[in-house]
Image (cartoon, rainbow, N blue to C red):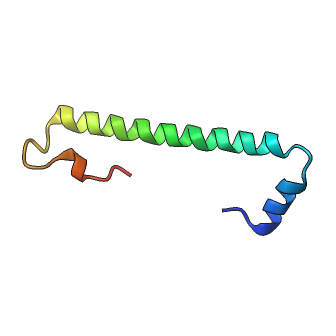
Amino acid sequence: MDTLDELLELLESPDTRKKTSSKGKKRKWREIEALKDKQRLRKELQELDIFADSVDLDEFDFN
């Protein structure tokens, strides 16, 4: 999380919208990539069928 000085600097800068928009886009992109990675891992585990019927994949936290 940003320090108070960095937050104040962002608020006082003239192009605040552009910076926050860029940060928001990067954050959203990281979230999308994390979701894709989770889906990819789940699909690979299902294809390998390592757990068979003994364990439900929904029980695992793929973070």
Q: Where residue 2 appears, x then y in whole percent?
A: 71, 62
Residue at 90 percent of width and 55 percent of height: 12
Q: Is residue 6 above or below residue 61?
A: below
Residue at 43 percent of width and 40 percent of height: 35
Residue farthest left in this picture: 53
Residue at 85 percent of width and 55 percent of height: 11
Count numbered badges in the picture.
0
Horizontal side of 1 relative to 33 (left or right) equals: right
Snapshot quadrant of residue 3: bottom right
Horizontal side of 53 relative to 7 (left or right) equals: left
Q: In this view, does 9 lie above or below 23?
A: below
Foreground residue among 49 and 11: 11
Residue farthest bottom in this picture: 4
Q: Where residue 1 appears, x then y in whole percent?
A: 66, 62
Q: Where residue 43 appears, x then y in whole percent?
A: 27, 33
Residue at 84 percent of width and 46 percent of height: 16
Horizontal side of 52 relative to 14 (left or right) equals: left
Q: Where residue 60 appears, x then y in whole percent?
A: 26, 52
Foreground residue among 41 and 29: 29
Q: Is residue 28 above or below residue 54?
A: above
Foreground residue among 49 and 1: 1
